[in-house]
Image (cartoon, rainbow, N blue to C red):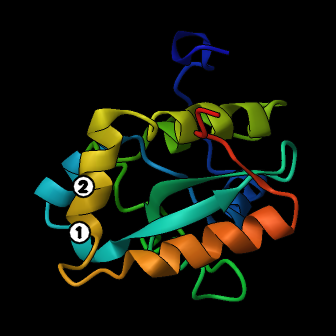
Amino acid sequence: MPMKDLPKESVCGCQKCVNMCWSSPCFPTPDDALKLIEAGHKDKLSVTCYVSQDTLEYATVISPIGLDWGHAQARKCVFLDSNNLCTLHECGLKPTEGKILDCSVDNYSEVRLKIVDTWNTDKGKEVIKMLLPENHDSSIDELMKLRFRIMGIKDRFATV
């Protein structure tokens, strides 16, 4: 499904939709992440290794903080307020995935993978570098990739 074939933007506040923000907060595209960084939200984003349960492939992306490998389980989206409303709606910064996914979308995994694939671009790689600490140890990335290979999980962006 090319990006142009993604569902249209939707705004739904039903409990099922709010639960998505608690169980699987939306991933931004590189353009979305740049807008969030420019708006002062860099501290609420992290570099994440996403593993697709459908394809058993992994990819490095940016996500709301709390979904990175350092946490045993996902937490509610850092952009939800105390009333469980997205603070990014009003300022026009809600990530593309969050704009199009709602309770009516059947192919959630397919949409997520299209968003993930936007990170396999020069722009995506540059945005990821913006969030890595200056003293980032790339050997940690290599150990994680080795662990995935041992588990039978493939690099989604591998060119081999």
Q: Is residue 91 visible?
A: no
Q: Find disc 2 in the rendering and name its residue.
A: 36
Q: Which mark is residue 42?
A: 1
Q: Residue at the spot x=34%, y=42% of the render? A: 124
Q: Residue at the spot x=81%, y=56% of the render? A: 153
Image quadrant holding the C terminus, namely top right
Residue 125 shown left or right of residue 148 in the figure: left
Compared to 124, does 27 lie above or below? below
Secondary element under disc 2, as helix, strand or loop, is helix
Q: Residue at the spot x=67%, y=77% of the render? A: 74
Q: Is residue 4 visible?
A: yes
- Residue 5 at x, y = what percent? 61, 11
The residue lying toward the viewer, choosing from 131 and 111, is 131
Compared to 148, does 30 lie above or below? above
Residue 63 shown left or right of residue 125 in the figure: right
Secondary element under disc 1, as helix, strand or loop, is helix
Among all residues in the image, which is located at the extreme front?
A: 160
Residue 124 shown left or right of residue 9 in the figure: left
Image quadrant holding the N terminus, namely top right
